[in-house]
Image (tube, grey):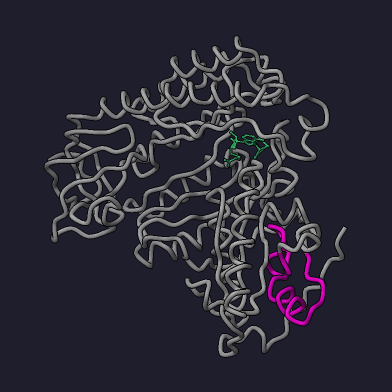
Amino acid sequence: MSIPVPITVSDNRDSPRNPRGAVYIETYGCQMNFNDSEIVAAILKKHGWQITENPDRADVILLNTCAIREKAEERVKQRIRELQARFRRAHRQTLIGVLGCMAERMRKELIEQGYAEIVCGPDAYRSLPVLIDRAATGQEAVNVLLSREETYEDIEPVRLHSNGVSAFVSIIRGCNKMCTFCVVPFTRGRERSRPPESILREVRQLVAQGYREVVLLGQNVDSYRWVDNRTGQVVRFADLLGMVARLSPWLRVRFSTSHPRDMTEDVLAVMARYPNICKHIHLPVQSGSTRVLQRMRRGYTREWYLALIERIRQWLPDVAITTDIIAGFCGETEEDHEETLTLMEAVRFDQSFMFRYSERPRTYAQRYYRDDVPLEVKIRRLNEIIALQREHSLWRNQQEIGKIRRVLIEGTATRSANQWAGRTSQNKMVVFARDTRLHPGDYVDVEIVDCTSATLIGGRWRKVQDIQEPVHL
Ligand code: SAH
Ligand code: F3S
């Protein structure tokens, strides 16, 4: 165990007129991590640090890390070794700090193994300015205390990763689900919801700054629950969604991630009611075999998941559904794998994130199951899943051809400077010919004329003047 660092905030440290040096932040992993880095940037700026985009100019390098799979950790270690070699060659004294899930999982080991001078877990970011000072004077700088309350509700994130159109807003931290394969409950701690007032305040500010989209984030947004101590009033996820959606019809509202077990009918009803709540649900299934799902402790069966998909499509005929799938979990037979493929065929997901199982320390699966699917079998099964998903993604996108979709322009397409790129409500990327009359943040109704498995290609378009008008050209 590391020794907790006392959090002392002195007044002069709070002053932005007290520049201390430059910090470079690099982020790995999920959207939540990207948002956390924005919170970290806000905390450091408040304490006089500048944020730089150039690691060679930085006095401190912070890597906000992911521990979900072994490969994610390997990548970070590799990157740190690379940075260390670079600084040695340049004779620079740069402090390296590891934040996030790897910090929480490996703790002091990261310092002992020479990867970092600073180690700071996801609930300890307020102590980061103190930790940096301690490391700078050669003292131990580790804080991996998890909290039951911390939501950083009062911190206004510095938008590092934003295109000025869309912003992440965290609404709930941690996870209580304890899926047997997953390290998140150990690295991000217990579930806790952020007060609705602070969420609404942040979103209102974003709207005032011209943002047109918010993505409400949590490991499991559907278990959002806030009880007002004075009135006893309960705000659940469906209530919160409605509150955010009502702030402005010009604001698109997205959310991620939903757990099939917690997704309730009232969330679907709210989604159906508000046109500005995007018609996209990310609903990780993990496996199509009930036996495997039970070993994963996901709390649902194959049939239950398929019935949920039915209900979702009844409420929201136009919805896009995406998922996460794990290939080769402990004890997965060829038959189980076939069931994953047939479930995919039944649902035809719009997109999936697909992984091969990676054993993680401290999880139930690591302690009680054998990681018994040989690597080459995992890889083969994963490849079959990926190939099938590609067919489905293409097929889903082909269904869009000929439709007119409302697109929120995010910026220039990555592949071509002559094209605008934006998303439909279903979270599908659309590219179409650039026109100087349009700008990022504009809504346009675009006719879909072609597609690949990843992108829709738009043709004729018309700028939306009044957001309430129906989609048309
Ligand atoms: N509820 C979370 C899930 C976090 S992890 C969210 O907000 O997205 C993201 C995905 O990683 C999981 O859904 C799962 O498919 C995958 N994953 C988690 N642990 C894994 C492991 N040990 N090996 C392989 N994939 C894993
Ligand atoms: Fe992990 Fe399951 Fe929570 S996948 S983040 S323990 S819902």
Q: Is residue 118 magenta?
A: yes
Ligand 1 shows up in the quarter that is top right
Q: Does residue 102 show up magenta in the picture?
A: no
Q: Residue at x 72, y 39 (%)?
A: 176
Residue 466 versus residue 120 in the image, above or below: above
Instruction: Count all numbered tags in the image, as a single digit.
Output: 0
Residue 381 in the image: above or below residue 102: above
Q: Nearer the viewer, residue 404 or 327?
A: 327
Where residue 415 sits in the image (x, y, percent)?
Answer: 27, 50
156 and 178: which is toward the camera: 178
- 471 vs 432, nearest the viewer: 432
Q: Which residues are magenta?
A: 116-142
Pinpoint residue 164: horizontal percent, then vertical percent.
Answer: 36, 62
Image quadrant occupied by the N terminus: bottom right
The image quarter in which residue 36 lies: bottom right
**Residue 45 seen in the figure:** no
Q: Is residue 342 left or right of residue 450?
A: right
Which residue is at the front of the view, 349 or 12?
Answer: 349
Residue farthest along the top direction in this orientation: 335
Q: Note whether residue 248 is visible.
A: yes
In this rendering, position of residue 404 left or right of residue 220: left
Q: Is residue 234 above or below residue 358?
A: below
What is the x, y in percent for residue 421?
Answer: 27, 50
Q: Is residue 211 left or right of residue 218?
A: left
